[in-house]
Amino acid sequence: MLKHILVIDDMLTNLKIVESFLKPYYKVSLIKSGEQALKFLEKNKPDLILLDIQMPGMDGFETIRKVKEKPENRDIPVLFLTSQEDIDSRMRGFQLGATDFILKPFMPEMVLKVIASRLAAVEENVE
């Protein structure tokens, strides 16, 4: 069965680009806001979340904080897909439960490798 990746980004173009290279390998769900993501997670449990930091309304930091508040979501790896390179953003993200950061602009091959690595690490911890 295909692993399920939830992609959260307010820019439709970004969602479509990421979907185009993930779809051959994963089940992909696209969400345009943190608020929508929280509703989605009430009924669905993806294997990994790709999350943008800069979004209107609830930003990525607030989104991950609310996602990780729920015990059933704590083990879902969250990768920030962002243009924010500063150390403060990274430290804040890791403190809130992020697994890794992938900087925009990104290479699809790199994103696929990081996702595969993170999913493999989760499976190792389950066994």
Image (cartoon, helix red, strand yellow):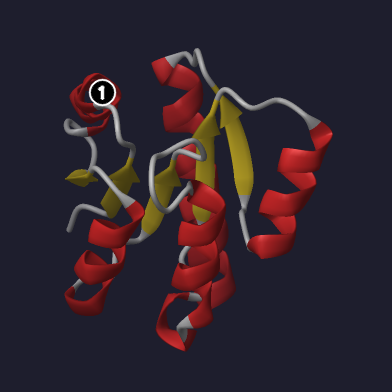
Residue sitting at the far front:
57
Of residues 117 and 80, the one nearer the viewer is: 80
Instruction: Depth check: give the residue in front, 57 or 47.
Output: 57
Q: Is residue 55 above or below residue 13?
A: below
Q: Is residue 75 visible?
A: no
Which residue position holds label 1? Answer: 21
Image position of 104 (left or right of 101): left
Measuring from the top left, give residue 114's x and y in whole percent.
Answer: 53, 36
What quarter of the picture does the N terminus occupy? Answer: bottom left
Check disc 1: other Cα within 10 Å, few if <14, some if 14-19, many if 20+: some
User: What residue is shown at x 20% (from left), y 26% (from top)?
Assistant: 12
Residue at x 17% of width, y 77% of height:
43
Q: Amino acid at mark 1?
A: Phe
Query: 3 or 69, which is in the foreground?
Result: 69
User: In the rendered view, would you say 122 is above or below 86?
Assistant: below
Q: Which residue appears at 80% of the width and 40% of the height?
A: 88
Q: Position of residue 111 (x, y in %)?
A: 46, 28
The quarter of the picture where residue 116 lies is top left
Q: Give the quadrant of residue 15.
A: top left
- Figure check: 100 above or below 110: below
Looking at this view, is 73 or 31 the one in front? 31
- In the rendered view, tell whether residue 18 sits above or below residue 34: above
Q: Is residue 66 left or right of residue 24?
A: right
Could you tell me if residue 65 is visible in this image? yes
- Residue 86 appears at what percent x and percent y? 77, 29
The answer to whether 59 appears left or right of 95 in the picture is left
Tell me: 33 left or right of 127.
left
